[in-house]
Amino acid sequence: MTAWTDSSSNDPRRQDRRRRRVSLVLRERRCGFDRRSPTGVGRVLCTLDPVLLYLRGRPGALAALLVTVNALNLADFALTMNVLASGGGEMNPIMRSLLAAGPVHTAAFKLLAIMAATYTVWRCRRYRSALAAALILLSAFAAVFVYEVVGLFLLV
């Protein structure tokens, strides 16, 4: 009987089995964008790859871009208020209905919506589509800014 207890301490069935588990999960090791041939919308984004890779590799540049988007959003709101005070009108039907409720509601909606969008882009900055969305936001707000500045000078 004592031989049985001595051999049980060396029995491999009684040892901790957690060390021998093999993980069947394959970890992603790629760090760049997908190099497969693009189709559809991917072809358009493929032409932006140098810019997107630059933004992905330099978080400071992406942060500056997103801060610029938020600054252009604030400028858009201020210029919209100036245009409305000068006798112009709001073309966006959503903003028009919010302006009817009051400028505070409009400002809160604009700030929160764009801050949420830029936060989402920042959190998803590994992905090509998020970086492309950042460029689309920047170009859209820059176009709106130029449109409102030109419109304001034409009203004056």
Image: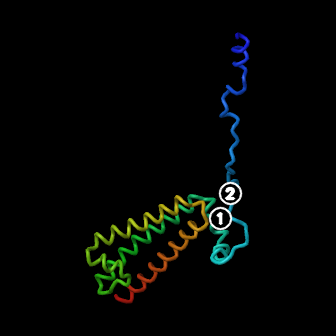
- The residue at which mark 2 appears reads as 31
Earlier residue among tags 1 and 2: 2
Q: What residue is at 52 percent from the left and 63 percent from the top?
A: 121
Question: As rendered, which of 85 and 9 lies closer to the eye?
Answer: 9
What's the residue at 40%, 73% (across, down)? 75
Q: Nearer the viewer, residue 98 or 145?
A: 98
Q: Specify how the rendered protein is coloured.
A: rainbow
Where on the picture, by quarter, is residue 62? bottom right
Q: CA distance from mark 1 to mark 2?
A: 11 Å
> Compared to 79, does 120 lie above or below?
above
In the picture of the structure, the residue carrying the numbered disc 1 is: 53
Which residue shows up at 73% across the image and 72% down it? 37
Q: Which one is closest to the eye, mark 1 or mark 2?
A: 2
**Quadrant of the image occupied by residue 40:** bottom right
- The answer to which quarter of the image holds residue 106 is bottom left
x, y percentage for residue 24? 69, 47
Mark 1 touching mark 2, by CB under 8 A?
no
Crowding near pointer 1: few (<14 within 10 Å), some, many (20+)? Answer: some
Amino acid type of disc 1?
Answer: Leu
Q: How far from the left and from the top, in percent, is residue 142?
A: 49, 76
